[in-house]
Amino acid sequence: MQQLSYFELVGFGPQGWGWALLTATGMTIAVAICGFLAGSVVGTLVAWGKIGGNVVIRSIADGYTTVLRGIPDLLVIYLFYFGGSAALGAIGSLFGADGFIGVPAFATGAMAIGIVSGAYQAEVFRGAYQVVSRGELEAARSVGMHRWLMFRRIIAPQVLRYAIPGLGNTWQLVLKESALISVTGLVELLRQSHIAAGSTRRPFDFYLTAAVLYLLITWVSTYLFQRAETHSLRGMRRAS
Amino acid sequence: MDFAFMRDAFLTLMAGVPLTLNLALTSIVFGAIFAMLLAVMRMSGLKILDWPAQAYVFVFRGTPLLVQIFLIYYGLGQFRPTLQEWGLWTFFREPFWCAVLALTLNTAAYGSEIIRGGLQSVPHNQVEAARACGMSGFLLFRRVIFPIAVRQALPAYGSEIILMVKATSLASIITMMEVTGLAAKLISQTFRAVEVFIVAGLIYLVLNFIITRIIMAIEWWLSPHLRRPPAVEPRLEAAHV
């Protein structure tokens, strides 16, 4: 068999893996976005616990961020993947099903990423909340706003504004972490490259392509976060 | 919660700690040396040195570590005949050295930015004062710039070290049986994910706690100017006068 050139290999021709790689890139982006959004919800709740909770809630929130930032992400993914299927198996056996029930890899991955990135995002949100002026909060309370209204109108917009740079960093972490989801069998970019590398015996070409695609996503998202930052800071007076 | 099982799991997983530390330590030491080189290249002011270093940092910070590991461990297999010819295959055949190489290259990219930040934070008047005393070149670097830069960079470098300890877990994917590798094996044998997770997580937390303490101790040792002066004991005989 004649050796295919690199561009035939990763291109969109009959023997090319182009579409497969593009679909997988979409899957990487999808799982990263879902994980990131789940992490935002978790992070907001944990940050709330850290700021406004009593001693018990605060120590739980502190423990959560310390633990999740101190152990490898891969362990968390294993916990969700194996633990999830064990739990599903236990529930299944109640209804008479027996044997191994696999959890959907996408949901597992997104949840694991969400739980880990939630710990990072909680710190970002907490830091951003501390920049919100106390006077504005008092003013909101004095005009009779309730907690939810105050959160929606005063706190959330400002916290988001100050949190954008930190969220950008967390997003980069999430994106790189999504590569670890490949261990659960979800066909995202790295998994697809692995499959392609195995079937064509051209591992270097495919992993290099994967690296370039990751770099491309990083690069585009850096640009988007920068745009968001300048947009959110319009009309603000800068210190320098 | 089965405590007897957790004790057994603890003993099993502890066998992976030496390998985890070995991977982390080797790559942190080599990575720091390389990071210093990159930082010097970035600060040299010469485009021909600055530009490659900048590109290197961009590439290695913008791609997942796992892709880098796969690229080195599986990817370089594509060039096996060439590598054998050069006598490098004995190195790239070993998953340990591939993991160390990937971790080193990765941490060097992050570390170089931390070191650059540290070097740039050295106040200029300190350098001027040193020059006024007649120091220059390597002596100036060794006595003034380097110690101040290290003190500035140490907290950030500390978190990079913690990240490296966590990153060694990825070596388990290329068959290294360190703590995470043993944990994954144990989970797939026993299907007790929660117990094994707690034990493995605890081991990592303790490791990282000890490392944090060591770095805090070095920080304390490096910044005597921030410490309070030792309280002077009042002289006892003075009270009797």
Image (cartoon, coloured by chain):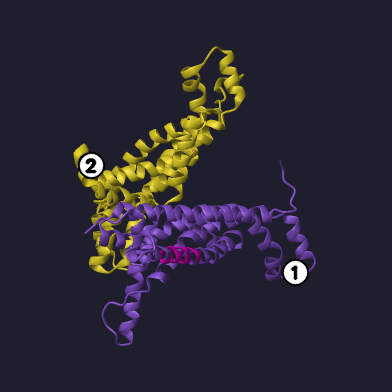
**Tags 1 and 2 touching, CB below 8 Å:** no
User: Residue at (32%, 42%) from the top-left corner?
Assistant: B101
Chain that bears disc 1? A
Nearer to me, A147 or A4: A4
| Label 2: few (<14), some (14–19) or many (≥20) C-alpha neighbours in 10 Å | some
Which amino acid lies under the numbered mark 2 shown in the image of this protein?
A: Leu
Which amino acid lies under the numbered mark 1 shown in the image of this protein?
A: Met
What is the x, y in percent for residue A151?
67, 66
Q: Quadrant of residue B187?
A: bottom left
User: Residue at (31%, 51%) from the top-left corner?
Assistant: A204
Image colour assigned to chain B: yellow
In the displayed structure, A162 sits above or below A146; it is: above
What is the x, y in percent for residue A20?
38, 66
Return the residue at label 2: B83
Q: Most extreme residue toward the top, as rendered?
A: B134
Quadrant the C terminus of chain B occupies: top right
In the displayed structure, B171 sits above or below A199; it is: above
User: Judging from the image, what is the letter of the chain drawn in purple?
Assistant: A
Q: On the rendered structure, is B128 left or right of A209?
A: right
Q: Quadrant of residue B232?
A: top right
Nearer to me, B78 or A7: A7
Return the residue at label 1: A145
Name the dominant secondary structure of the magenta segment.
Answer: helix
Numbered disc 1: secondary structure? loop
**Is residue B60 visible in this depiction of the protein?**
yes
Q: The magenta stretch spans which residues?
A: A23-33
Count of marks placed on residues: 2
Is residue A228 found inside the magenta-colored segment of the image? Answer: no
